[in-house]
Image (tube, grey):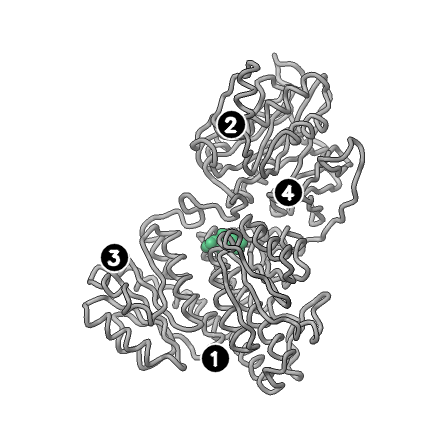
């Protein structure tokens, strides 16, 4: 959701911390982009030395940069910044963070939700506090500010305030009183990391903001409060005593700063689509054992007897990750013969789930911070399931809360619409299903070796789809369909979830109505939608169900619905108004090829419509509230 950054730099000549904060916010903008702001401790002519000053602007980060031009907040080396995804109160300058208590002593930024804010606000108003915004955050600001004004201890004031609030938060506050500056932060729910390096200290919602300064970061745990000052980061507990430090181990992040740049592409989404063959390379690196027809995962994996003890799998995820979960279901049931259920994480929590002995809960998440996924996984664990994270962010809450992790190695994904992270999740699912199948002797060595061979041959096939020519051919198709009223995506078997994913990609970035359906279900209802204004995209790969899908295409054509056919089934190619020929691979791996043209189709439709591809309306990349 929102992005938070804080920095205290001691570098010689550093006198405009706003530059560092804005640079950090740029990498966090994917977390929210309806307004942004910074707050710094500054010696201002005419103001008390150490006055806290803020600049806040509705809209994109460029608006804030404009407001800061000419060093509007220069003369400061410590401050906090925020990029917002509105929850309480519309996007506006007043509701943008940081918030102050009107005293020029503190500036506070917050990500999350204060659930009891109405009650607290009423109490504060009764005590004479006048609110400047509609946000829940301002309540927290006044609670901190009132205490700080009397005892001048920012960490203590934040601790006391947080003990009064109910909810989820990552919060950072900068304060100055009587010439003493303090920078503190705390976490309960949304992610927050801290870092110390040669010429400064930083805090941020995502390591991306810290990477230009250091690759060594420390993730805070829920309930942590950190006190930062030049040359020191001390972590304490919100419910602990002041000065009682707790140990947190730093992590070395293996991402580089380049990954957070567009690298010459017009959008992060296009760059990330084109990165997918490298992602495949990274996701299988050091994991294939061709001579044994098996795979291995780094770290402390499960032994064969452990894997044999798994009697049932529950997959928990949201959005695109859920679609990867549905593919995983086909893979695990097909290759390891274990029954699998896939649940929306947000539903699992409230449907009285049954966890029988031998259940493995697999939580799939790019960010590892999605609130619904974390809560569902924790519930599964409480009910007795073993837990496995399939996750892209090493050190994220999910990886720390699950017993085991398979890292997807997609690298940072900045485009709000998930692309390469999905591909990486599919590869992890394929590898895990293969490992399970081998451990349980459902797959013999020769079958395992063949599957590995197919995976190794996939890369050139994927690369053939990641070319400018192929992308241009999809754009031409997009041009012919861009003005349609709606889109129906059909797929069957392991490609049914790819139809769901194609529809999700299109609707989230181009705002066109699109539905994904199991191809065999079309005749049970959606067929009523077919008319010349609705384009149907049908995925049909060579394999067991190709004939059945073909007859579905005929049914659409008979009702004058335009059809785009996509896949390796040659028999379907003559049936489409437009055709996207996809190289042949095994049915299990075919989703990895089919998803690429669907990602490109969504991209080009959105581009032709002039939509903001990397920052679609109303969305945020990481949904850290329920
Ligand atoms: C779609 C998209 C979302 C996420 C979902 C889960 O393009 O990005 O649907 O897939 O919010 O996010 P993670 O994977 O971070 O748990």
Cα gap from disc 4 to disc 3, whole angstroms: 43 Å
**Residue tagged by mark 1?**
586
Q: Can residue 263 be seen from the camera position used here?
A: no
Q: Earlier in the sequence, mark 2 or mark 3?
A: 2
Residue 507: give x, y in percent of width and height: 36, 54
Mark 4 burial class by Cα count in 10 Å: few <14, some 14-19, many 20+: many
Mark 3, secondary structure of its residue: loop
Q: Earlier in the sequence, mark 1 or mark 3?
A: 3
Q: Earlier in the sequence, mark 2 or mark 4?
A: 2
Q: Residue furthest top?
A: 46
Q: Can residue 551 be seen from the camera position used here?
A: yes
Cα gap from disc 2 to disc 1, whole angstroms: 56 Å
Cα gap from disc 2 to disc 4, whole angstroms: 26 Å
In front of the other: label 2 or label 3?
2
Q: Look at 21% across and 59% down and name the residue there.
A: 533
Residue 253: give x, y in percent of width and height: 68, 53
Residue 103: give x, y in percent of width and height: 60, 17
> Toward which corner of the image does residue 80 lie, by quadrant?
top right
Mark 3 burial class by Cα count in 10 Å: few <14, some 14-19, many 20+: some
**Residue tagged by mark 3?**
484
In this view, 370 is above or below 576: above
């Amino acid at each position: 959701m929102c992005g938070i950054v804080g920095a205290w730099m001691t570098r010689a000549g550093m006198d405009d911390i706003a530059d560092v904060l804005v640079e950090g916010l740029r990498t966090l903008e994917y977390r929210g982009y309806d307004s942004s702001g910074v707050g710094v401790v500054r010696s201002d002519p005419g103001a008390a030395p150490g006055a806290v000053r803020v600049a806040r602007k509705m809209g994109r980060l460029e608006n804030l940069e404009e407001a800061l031009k000419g060093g509007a907040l220069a003369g400061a080396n410590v401050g906090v910044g925020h990029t917002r995804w509105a929850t309480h109160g519309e996007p506006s300058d007043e509701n943008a963070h940081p918030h102050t208590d009107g005293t020029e002593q503190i500036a506070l930024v917050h990500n999350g939700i204060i659930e009891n804010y109405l009650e607290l606000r009423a109490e504060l108003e009764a005590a004479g506090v006048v609110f400047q915004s509609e946000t829940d955050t301002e309540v927290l600001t006044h609670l901190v500010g009132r205490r700080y004004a009397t005892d001048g201890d920012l960490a203590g004031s934040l601790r006391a305030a947080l003990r009064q609030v109910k909810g989820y938060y990552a919060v950072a506050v900068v304060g100055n009183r009587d010439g003493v500056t303090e920078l503190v932060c705390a976490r309960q729910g949304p992610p927050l990391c801290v870092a110390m390096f040669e010429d400064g200290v930083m805090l941020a919602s995502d390591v991306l903001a810290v990477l230009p300064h250091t690759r060594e970061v420390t993730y805070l745990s829920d309930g942590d409060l950190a006190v930062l000052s030049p040359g020191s980061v001390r972590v304490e507990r919100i419910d602990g005593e002041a000065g009682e430090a707790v140990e947190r181990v730093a992590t070395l992040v293996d991402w580089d700063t380049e990954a957070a740049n567009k690298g010459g592409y017009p959008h992060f989404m296009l760059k990330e689509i084109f990165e997918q063959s490298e992602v495949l390379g990274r996701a299988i690196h050091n994991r294939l054992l061709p001579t044994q027809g098996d795979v291995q995962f780094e770290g402390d994996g499960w032994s064969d007897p452990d894997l044999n003890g798994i009697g049932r799998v529950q997959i928990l995820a949201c959005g695109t990750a859920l679609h990867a979960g549905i593919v995983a279901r086909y893979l695990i049931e097909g290759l390891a013969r274990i029954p699998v259920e896939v649940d929306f994480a947000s539903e699992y929590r409230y449907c009285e789930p049954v966890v029988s002995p031998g259940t493995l809960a697999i939580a799939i998440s790019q960010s590892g911070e999605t609130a619904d996924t974390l809560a569902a996984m924790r519930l599964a664990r409480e009910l007795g399931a073993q837990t496995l994270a399939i996750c892209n962010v090493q050190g994220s809450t999910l990886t720390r809360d699950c017993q085991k992790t398979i890292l997807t190695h997609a690298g940072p994904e900045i485009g709000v619409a998930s692309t390469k992270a999905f591909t990486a999740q599919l590869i992890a699912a394929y590898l895990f299903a293969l490992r399970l199948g081998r451990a349980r002797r459902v797959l013999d060595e020769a079958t395992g070796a063949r599957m590995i061979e197919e995976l190794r041959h996939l890369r050139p096939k994927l690369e053939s789809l990641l070319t400018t020519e192929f992308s241009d051919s999809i754009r031409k198709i997009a041009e012919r369909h861009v003005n349609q009223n709606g889109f129906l995506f059909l797929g069957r078997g392991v490609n049914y979830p790819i139809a769901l994913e194609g529809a999700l990609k299109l609707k989230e970035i181009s705002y066109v109505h699109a539905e994904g359906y199991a191809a065999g279900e079309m005749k049970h209802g959606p067929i009523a939608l077919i008319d010349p204004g609705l384009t149907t995209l049908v995925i049909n790969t060579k394999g067991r169900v190709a004939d059945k899908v073909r007859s579905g295409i005929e049914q659409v054509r008979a009702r004058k619905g335009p059809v785009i056919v996509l896949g390796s089934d040659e028999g379907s190619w003559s049936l489409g108004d437009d055709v996207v020929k996809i190289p042949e691979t095994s049915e299990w791996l075919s989703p990895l090829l089919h998803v690429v043209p669907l990602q490109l189709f969504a991209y080009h439709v959105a581009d032709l419509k002039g939509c903001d591809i990397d920052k679609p309306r109303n969305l945020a990349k990481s949904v850290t509230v329920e």
